[in-house]
Image: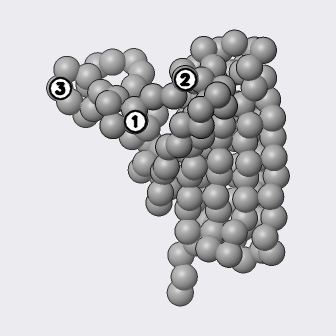
Amino acid sequence: MAAETSVKLVIPSRVRLVDLVHSAAEKIAEIAGFSDDEMLNIGLAVREAVINAIKHGNGEDASKEVEILLEVTGRGLRVRIQDGGAGFDPEGTPDPTAEDNLLQTSGRGLLLIRAFVDDVRFNYKQGRGMEVTLEKALKTG
């Protein structure tokens, strides 16, 4: 594994900038020592979380920023995504696998994020918005 490294990106709430963050996440995952498949999964998880921050957290208001911190740790990778929104209850989101939701065109982001990383934590910071932390450990052995 690479030495501890971190990269911080601060972007306006514009969906067109998500590709930049996705690429950075995959590159940091590569530096951390993840396989190609794991890099792809990490990139997709970060992409979904940033889209959620832009669309749901900041309401696509380009005057509001999304802050992304990508960190190579002693165990693997940690990503923190901070928006300026009012927060939400992640447990209160509709189950995308429920029969009534199967044909919906959106609503699967959290399901995908949770499938691709080991740990997802949500922390609302009063006056600062929602922070989502994603962690993925390197496989040992």
* Observer able to see residue 120: yes
Instruction: Choose the circle earlier in sequence order: 3 or 2.
Output: 2
80 versus 48 height, above or below = below
Q: Which residue is mark 2?
A: 86
Colour scheme shown: one colour
Position of residue 97 in the picture relative to residue 1 (left or right): left
Task: Please state which of residues 93 and 131 is positioned toward the viewer in this rendering.
Answer: 131
Question: What residue type is disc 1 on?
Answer: Pro
Q: Which residue is mark 1?
A: 90
112 versus 106 height, above or below = below
Which residue is at 75% across, 26% downward?
65
Q: Secondary structure at mark 1?
A: helix
Q: Residues within 10 Å of mark 3 (few under 14, many from 20)?
A: few
Where residue 116 appears, as percent x and y from the top left, is 48, 52
Question: What residue type is disc 3 on?
Answer: Glu
Where residue 136 appears, as percent x and y from the top left, is 55, 62
